């Protein structure tokens, strides 16, 4: 399983989850019911395209998220902390040459390799690898099946993510404030989903 990783999903920690969900649904997107991440203090809703998905993420339990090693509360409070609200999840195991830049997280029942930038350079997007051949994703019956594919991720911020070698759509760094734009093929109008989060489809 060690070697070239595959982009599995991307997340964005939203400030207004109810509003973000409503704006997506009003635009015709269908999100799955999502789940609470026990022990992590977060909750999600997801939409997907072939081979990968997008995860709206937010703090569900403030005390739990502060006690968790990932400290996603800092990324959720990006305006105050300067940490990026963007996460890039890859599937597989980093190569032996890259593995030293990661640490193992085992709280979800399988190993996740967390890039050390999560602690050392939180202004960069969170980069991690799920050590699975296939990651359980949204239920196909309830997940987004709107035509199109995720063509590009445009990640705004003061520093570009520390990307491993991977297969999948390009991740383009846009210098400036923290932001994420999902470019769906065929691309069209831009939807402002939440502060810093847009979807162009």
Image (spheres, helix red, strand yellow):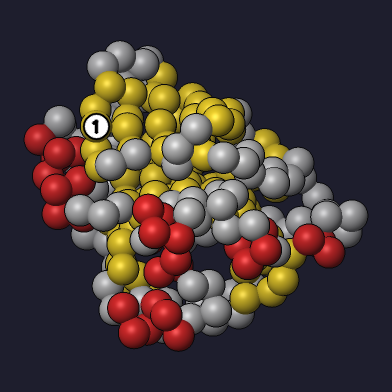
Badge 1: how crowded within 10 Å, few (<14), some, or many (20+)?
some
Snapshot quadrant of residue 45: bottom left
Snapshot quadrant of residue 80: bottom left
Tell me what residue is drawn at x 37 percent, y 53 percent.
79
| Tally of numbered tags | 1
Q: Nearer the viewer, residue 89 or 148?
A: 89
Tell me what residue is drawn at x 30 percent, y 14 percent.
188
If the image is split into quadrants, where does the N terminus sit? bottom right
Identity of the residue furthest to the right in this view: 97
Q: Nearer the viewer, residue 54 or 66?
A: 66
Looking at the image, is 90 positioned above or below residue 113?
Answer: above
Looking at the image, is 166 positioned above or below residue 100?
Answer: above
Residue 14 position, x and y percent, is 30, 53
Residue 113 position, x and y percent, is 67, 66
Snapshot quadrant of residue 134: bottom right
From this viewpoint, is residue 166 visible? yes
Looking at the image, is 51 positioned above or below residue 201?
Answer: below
Q: Nearer the viewer, residue 102 or 157?
A: 157
The secondary structure type at the circle numbered 1 is: strand
Q: Nearer the viewer, residue 178 or 18?
A: 178
Residue 19 position, x and y percent, is 14, 48
Tell me what residue is drawn at x 89 percent, y 55 percent.
97
Position of 126 with respect to 145 (left or right) is right
Tell me what residue is drawn at x 39 percent, y 45 percent.
54
Residue receiving disc 1 = 192
Position of 21 with respect to 195 (left or right) is left
From this viewpoint, is residue 137 visible? no
If the image is split into quadrants, where does the C terminus sit? top left
Looking at the image, is 9 positioned above or below residue 182?
Answer: below
Identity of the residue furthest to the front in this view: 80
Residue 141 position, x and y percent, is 25, 50
């Amino acid at each position: 399983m060690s070697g070239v990783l595959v982009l599995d999903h991307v997340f964005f920690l939203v400030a207004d989850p109810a509003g973000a969900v409503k704006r997506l649904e009003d635009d015709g997107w269908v999100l799955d019911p999502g789940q609470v991440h026990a022990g992590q203090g977060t909750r999600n809703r997801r939409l997907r395209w072939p081979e990968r998905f997008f995860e709206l993420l937010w703090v569900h339990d403030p005390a739990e998220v502060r006690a968790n090693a990932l400290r996603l509360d800092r990324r959720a409070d990006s305006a105050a902390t300067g940490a990026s609200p963007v996460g890039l999840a890859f599937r597989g195991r980093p190569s032996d040459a890259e593995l030293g830049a990661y640490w193992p997280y085992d709280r979800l029942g399988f190993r996740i390799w967390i890039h050390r930038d999560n602690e050392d350079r939180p202004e960069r997007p969170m980069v991690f690898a799920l050590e699975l051949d296939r990651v359980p994703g949204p239920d196909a019956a309830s997940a987004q099946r709107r035509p199109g594919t995720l063509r590009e991720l445009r990640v705004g911020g003061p520093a570009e993510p520390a990307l491993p070698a991977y297969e999948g759509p390009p991740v383009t760094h846009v210098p400036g404030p923290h932001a994420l734009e999902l470019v769906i093929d065929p691309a069209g109008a831009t939807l402002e989903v939440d502060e810093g989060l847009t979807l162009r489809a």
